[in-house]
Image (cartoon, rainbow, N blue to C red):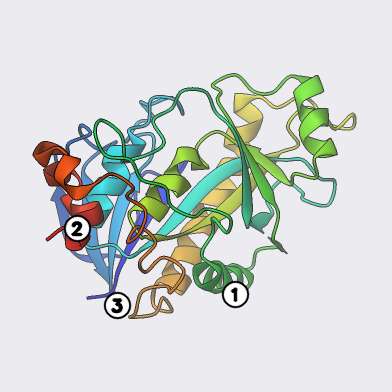
Amino acid sequence: MKTVGVIGGSGLYAIEGLSDVEEISMETPFGAPSDVVVSGMLDDTRLLFIPRHGRGHRFTPSEVPYRANIWALKKLGASWCVSLSAVGSLKEEIVPGDVVIIDQFIDRTKGRPSTFFGNGIVGHVPFGQPISPVLAGILETASREAGAKVHVGGTYVCMEGPAFSTRAESFLYRSCGASVIGMTNLPEAKLAREAEIAYATIALATDYDCWHTGHDDVSVDAVIAIMKQNVALAKRIVAIAASRVPETPDPLESGAAQFAVMTAADRIPAERLEALQPIIGKYFS
């Protein structure tokens, strides 16, 4: 069955219109996911929905259990993952309310667990092209059909948070040519690559961060006002895109972890292989 994971960002805590809905409570080797995983059918596609911050928005960006979320999606059969993320715009032309289909990241997080490897098993996956071009293309088309103004390509700066940027930081990121800034898509995208899940982001601009002299500095109330509009848009995009995801996995992701492990097989602790069974188990059967 074609299975697509959907990770909801700020303001998006549920997906309507699903049939055969089931709430799945899980424990993983990396703790519990952000919330129950909502499984349901959207036409011929199974969706697995996780609200990134938990229902009621309980987790800061640094507290989100990213490993548990991606592990759960993989265990439940997801081979594709759509990330819905509220972001600040770093470019004049990206107006609050616009959609950006990003293709690169700059990681400015600090100390977040960003890999399934470690504790006796060492692995390195390629990450030069962090976004699935197949899924990104589907999301671009779906966004336009949903009525969004869409910007294709661009770099997402992932900061630690939870405070918003200083003005100096905002100007620094603009000087790097970055398009948007957020707090959550890394390590999410890295973990998805290790799990061989095709990953792409619908970045929903809510503000101009704090660099734009013609606008007030970013604030929660301003973000929420735009976010309410974006949530309805995001749901329309997902509904359109889900049926267009291919039955077969993205070639970019297929086998991404096959040659990642550098640790000799006889040196890998058995409990680590057991914990990573959904991630790399097929390569160590």
Assign the C terminus to one quadrant of the image.
bottom left
Q: Quick one: label 3, few (<14), some, or many (20+) residues within 10 Å?
A: few
The quadrant in which residue 64 appears is top left
Q: Which mark is residue 208?
A: none
Which amino acid type is shown beneath numbered disc 3? Asp
Return the residue at label 3.
Answer: 43
Dot in front, 3 or 1: 1
Residue 179 is situated, as x and y percent measured from the top left of the image, at: 74, 47
Q: Are marks 3 and 2 in contact (CB under 8 Å)?
A: no
Q: Are marks 1 and 2 in contact (CB under 8 Å)?
A: no
Q: Secondary structure at mark 3?
A: loop
Q: Nearer the viewer, residue 77 or 242?
A: 77
Return the residue at label 2.
Answer: 76
Give me the residue at 46% from left, 72% from top: 241
Classify residue 136 as left or right of residue 180. Answer: left
Which amino acid type is shown beneath numbered disc 1? Thr
Dot in front, 1 or 2: 2
Give me the residue at 25% from left, 30% from top: 119
Return the residue at label 1.
Answer: 141
**Is residue 209 shown above or below 283?**
above
User: Going from the N terminus, do you reach mark 1 or mark 2 first?
Assistant: 2
Residue 132 is situated, as x and y percent measured from the top left of the image, at: 51, 65
Which amino acid type is shown beneath numbered disc 2? Leu
Residue 87 is situated, as x and y percent measured from the top left of the image, at: 62, 41
Evaluate whether residue 97 shows in this view: yes
Q: How many marks?
A: 3
| Residue furthest right as drawn | 213
Q: Nearer the viewer, residue 49 or 227?
A: 49
Q: Are marks 3 and 1 in contact (CB under 8 Å)?
A: no
Q: Secondary structure at mark 2?
A: loop
User: Going from the N terminus, do you reach mark 3 or mark 2 first?
Assistant: 3
